[in-house]
Amino acid sequence: MKIVLYSGGNEDDNRFLNQRALELTGVKSPKLTLIPSSSYDAEDDFRFFVQEFSKLGVQKFMHFCVDIPYTKTVLKEAMKSDLIFLGGGNTFYFLKHLKKAGMFSHFSKFLKRGGVLCGLSAGAIILTPHVHTASFPHFDRDENPWDMKNLSAMRVVNFEFFPHYKNSKRYDAELLHHSKKTTIPLYACADGGGIIVDNDQISFCGKSHQFFQGKKLTISNYLG
């Protein structure tokens, strides 16, 4: 299983993670597919995606939205990719439409055949057991106007992920409080950081912290 979770940031911040994600494909000329969280502004997202990965030599790209009608042919072509990248945005909206489209089973098959599955911010949270971390802190969270109750997600990793983390007392207070209510660790990463899962091996990029059972531990200050 090959997964890369991105916190966020600009193109320079994420260049190391982009390079590692491509290396994980093991393919000389990989095909990449972007699945944005929403079809709104998706063309701009795709343009930026192509721009960044083109700098690393990628030439094959595909763009696939799940919140608007699509054909089986488009879905089939997307699943033939070497790397699928789930974009950022509203976590609840993205989760709603991924579930509606039945994408989790397709992603599972994709991972089993050796594909690399990446997620940025909301896309990364969706790869965890549930999307609770999108609900807090109260001053910086995703809105859930659809009043979604079932927040279970893909569960391809056994930890929670908190993107855009800022090392401050008010962030820590809510993350520590949440960590007391769960049985799995929560990893918080600042923008430019992330987590790389290569089968049984987990490595961290950037400023990363673990919140577990009411305690905070600094994992890494490595900047790729």
Image (cartoon, rainbow, N blue to C red):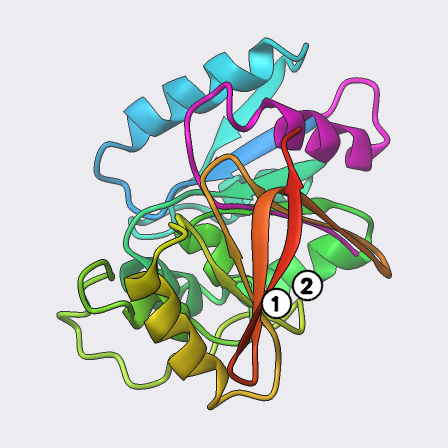
Give the Cα separation between the discs numbered 1 and 2. 5 Å
Report the side of 7 relative to 113 (left or right): left
User: Relative to the observer, which residue lies in front, 181 or 131?
Assistant: 181
The residue at 62%/81% (across/down) is: 184
Q: Check disc 2 and report the residue beneath it.
A: 108
| Image quadrant where residue 95 sits | bottom left
Residue 102 position within the rendered picture, expressed as x and y whole percent measured from the top left: 49, 67
Report the side of 45 relative to 1 (left or right): left
134 within the magenta span:
no
Vertical comparison of 217 with 33: above or below: below
Which residue type does callout 2 highlight? Ser
The residue at 42%/61% (across/down) is: 98
The residue at 71%/44% (across/down) is: 116
> Secondary structure beneath disc 2?
helix
User: Relative to the observer, which residue lies in front, 176 or 89?
Assistant: 176
Q: Are marks 1 and 2 in contact (CB under 8 Å)?
A: yes
In magenta, the rendered stretch is 1-30
25 within the magenta span:
yes
| Image quadrant where residue 183 sits | bottom right
Q: Locate the C terminus and report the quarter of the image it occupies.
A: top right
Residue 185 position within the rendered picture, expressed as x and y whole percent measured from the top left: 61, 75
Which residue type does callout 1 highlight? Ser
Circle 2 packing at 10 Å, graded few (<14), some (14-19), many (20+), is some
Report the side of 72 relative to 210 (left or right): left
Q: Check disc 1 and report the residue beneath it.
A: 105
The residue at 66%/13% (across/down) is: 56
Extreme residue toward the left, this view: 145
What number is the disc on residue 204? Answer: none
User: Relative to the observer, which residue lies in front, 62 or 24?
Assistant: 24
Residue 140 position within the rendered picture, expressed as x and y whole percent measured from the top left: 23, 58
Vertical comparison of 181 with 130: above or below: below
Vertical comparison of 4 with 218: above or below: above
